[in-house]
Image (spheres, rainbow, N blue to C red):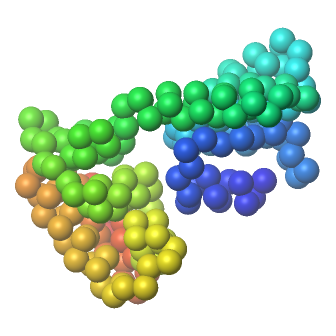
Amino acid sequence: MHDAREQARTIEYDVVLLDWMLPDGDGVELLREWRRAGLRTPVLLLTARGTVPERVTGLRAGADDYLPKPFDFDELLARIEALHRRAEGAIDLRRVGDVALDGRRRAIRFGASEVALTAREHALAAELFSHAGEVITRAHLLRSVWGSGFEGDPNVLDVYVGYLRQKLARASAPLEIRSVRGVGFRLVSREEPDA
């Protein structure tokens, strides 16, 4: 379960397939943790537990769909496709305080201000908003925003952090991206004291 916890926090998935009975823990408890932590990725719970009360428990824990074993592969595929379609149609909005990152419009919104972002700026902002207040390493941001095979100049991250800082300021957003020397960056409220 440790790997699943970490990967759900660091990797953005389209859909998660989760078994109730994991070798090292309870999948439904893991799902509850994810939902409490704000993970919105659609989850399809696959399990040998198929009674109505068990299905209700899984759905109330945060599963978006439930498929008891044994199942037909075509049905599984159709359910994954449906969850993915539903998720794509959902409003992609992340908030930190009163500042919103709108994924559909690719913009930062605060009050009446809306500032458009490029695709790369939005990807970087999405990582920072998803982990607001936390220190995110340079390596994680480069991997998440530019891909694991990125072989360019790693200073491109500093350039895009600069662009994003300017756009937060243009929106008059009460947030700032702070550098953590030798480690990475944090998205925090301007009023938050330095750590």
Q: Is residue 101 above or below residue 183?
A: above
Front one among 131 and 76:
76
In the displayed structure image, the side of residue 136 where residue 70 appears, left or right: right
Q: Is residue 65 above or below residue 32?
A: above
> Residue 117: where, in percent of width, then height?
20, 54
The quadrant of the image that shows the C terminus is bottom left
Residue drawn where x is 71% and y is 41% of the image: 17
- Residue 123, picture quadrant: bottom left
> Residue 42: where, in percent of width, then height?
58, 35
Front one among 130 and 174:
130
> Residue 5: where, in percent of width, then height?
68, 54
> Residue 174: where, in percent of width, then height?
19, 51
Residue drawn where x is 26% and y is 61% of the image: 121
Q: Is residue 133 above or below residue 139?
A: above
Looking at the image, which residue sits at the far front? Answer: 74
- Residue 61, picture quadrant: top right
Residue 62 makes an appearance in the image: no
